[in-house]
Image (tube, rainbow, N blue to C red):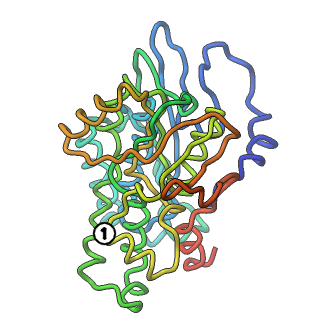
Amino acid sequence: MVKLSNEALRRVVFTNLGIADPDIIIGPRVGEDAAVVRVGDKYLVMHTDPITGAVEGVGWFAINIVANDIAVRGVKPRWFLLTLLLPRNVGEDGIRVIMSDVNRALIELGGSLVGGHTEYTPGIDRVIASTTAIGIGNRYVTTSGAKPGDLVLITKYVALEGTAVLANDFGEELMGKGVSKEIINRARAFLREISVVKEALEIADIANSMHDPTEGGLLQGLLEVAEASNVRLRINIDKIPILPETRLIFNALGIDPLKSLSSGTLIATVPRNQVEVAMNRLEKLGINYSVIGEVVNGEPGIELISNGRVLEEVHGFIEDEVMRLWHLKYGE
């Protein structure tokens, strides 16, 4: 899967959205994680996403990826609809494995599968899973809410999702480049860390914005916050946390973890006077965090700094490094 550029979305997608409904609070916009619709005095939050770029753990990804996009709105993901498109070589045992992962993810999140569709689809050679998640709440958080003066906080480590995908789908290539089986097995377990639901719900009442960086990685996620909020993010690259397993695997393949699938990392901008509150709450959950920068006035984009010096300015659209390798391997 390779996303359309923001410019293409604006030209050919956002110009064809049907009627203007006054109850749509947030519809399709660049950088926003989920739709928000007013229902009485509450807000219905919805999001849909396909899983096309992973072979292992499809059911686990299918639930957790969309759940993250509801949670960063500050709303608990409760109801899910799942569409499974299957190649003919997937039998009942294979479907059972997928659905077992789906069930396990739902139980951990406290969610329910309420519908969907399952079929054998001609012309595909792997499972494609598309999931819709829904939640309802009294308030919501946006990607576009970042304000000058906020501090930029992220949870866990970057590229957890990308590391797990590479370890699962590129194991032989990695061993051929000298990465040990032990490192690869540890990295495969990062699949369990891709949810940001707990931390997002924990700090939703004090965050001005929250975002779930997926394709394009941390840098693309930060760019989306900057562009949606019309602000500039000054990011200290030395503060960005990267696990040793991620460094080893990404170095072996010659790609950048900052530009790679990063579900499992929550981006939040928090007022300075609330950052200590956020850190205390995350510590009680046992979730590590890093304050990596600040929100400033200026042209939307990112300043990457180190030792007080600007190393690079980042703008535009970032191609995901893991997805690029994945498509090369699978001939797409």
Q: In which quarter of the image is residue 28?
A: top right
Q: Which quarter shows the C terminus?
A: bottom right
For the point 48% across and 53% down, which residue is it? 236
| 52 versus 206 height, above or below | below
Q: In which quarter of the image is residue 106?
A: top left
Q: In which quarter of the image is residue 146?
A: top right
In the image, 38 versus 272, the foreground residue is: 272
For the point 40% across and 40% down, which residue is it? 67
For the point 65% across and 54% down, which residue is it? 314
| 245 versus 210 height, above or below | below
Q: Where is residue 116 in the image (x, y as percent from the top left)?
A: 45, 42
Q: What element carries label 1?
A: helix
In the image, 255 versus 167, the foreground residue is: 255
Q: Where is residue 43 in the image (x, y as percent from the top left)?
A: 47, 18
Q: Which amino acid does label 1 sit on?
A: Arg
Q: Which quarter shows the N terminus?
A: bottom right
